[in-house]
Amino acid sequence: MKRKDKNKRKKLPKHRFTAATADKYELYQLAVQSPEEDIDFLIDVCKSERGRTPRHFREDFCGTGLLTAAWIKRDPANTAEGFDIDPEPIEWGQARHFAELGEAAKRATIHLKDAREPSNTAPDVRCAQNFSYWVLKTRSEMLNYFNGVREDLADGGVFVIDLHGGPESIDVMEEETELEDEGFTYVWDQDRHWPVTGEARLFIHFRFPDGTEMNRAFKYKWRLWGLVELKDVLEDAGFDQVDCYWEGTDEDGESGNGVFTKESKGEHCAAYVAYLVALK
């Protein structure tokens, strides 16, 4: 999926990856995910909207559970649950992220279950990141999912989803991002788009300085949901308030700066990333 710009990036040795030696989950995390920034946003939203610090967190479509593990690390009072139906990334994350947590890992429960299943404990904040929920392709499926989320949340709970849009989101195109510090190139491939169904076929590739490539490391077939229709479905699911948080731009006015603020209208641009924040 389209990566979020990160203000701070860890310096790593250049050219340490090749297609033969790299691990696709590690590359994905370096290229796409920004757990500390995401947690900052979730906490800030809960504090500003609800006047309190959330403690129990749920991550839907959690994959390797990187965000869940980071939540546990953030504060010894934090607990979390993650849900995903794919055992491979869950096993990878258990070996990488949760093993290093030691006793703290007991404060997290990772479920090999559909994200529409209920939590063990009602979450204060729940999220679906990296557009993963777009695997739900019909309005009835999405409404059912959002209804379940609202019912599952603790009183005063907050649900956060991210999304991307703009005219470029339906183009058939490849977007290359060279990650110099990490030593590889991330490629977001919008391979096909079917206007009648709103579906798209997308891939992530990774290219390396030695000329090798990890082709189609990740594959997606999603419906490209629009911001307004998602907001409408959240409201139909009974959420009391749904707000959009729009990403600002950097000094050149072309790239996202990773700072999201509440906006009622946004601005016209070729491509954007935003959050929808729904309050119970």
Image (tube, helix red, strand yellow):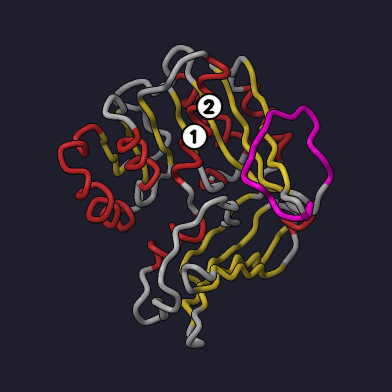
- The dot on residue 107 is none
Residue 149 is inside the magenta segment: no
Query: Residue under circle 1?
Result: 40
The residues bearing labels 1 and 2 have C-alpha atoms spaced at a distance of: 6 Å
Query: What's the residue at 44%, 63% (across, down)?
Result: 11
Residue 152 seen anywhere in this rendered image of the structure: no
Q: Residues within 10 Å of mark 2 (few under 14, many from 20)?
A: some
Query: What's the residue at 45%, 75% (across, down)?
Result: 14
Give how far across and how far down residue 208 sits, in percent.
49, 80
Query: Residue under circle 2?
Result: 44
Q: Quadrant of residue 191?
A: bottom right
Left or right of residue 154: residue 87: left
Residue lying furthest right: 268
- Asked whether disc 1 touches disc 2, contact meaning CB atoms under 8 Å apart, the reply is yes
Residue lying furthest left: 103
Q: Residues within 10 Å of mark 1 (few under 14, many from 20)?
A: few
Magenta-colored span: 252-268
Give how far across and how far down residue 232 sits, in percent.
69, 28
Q: For this rendering, which residue is in front, 138 or 7?
A: 7
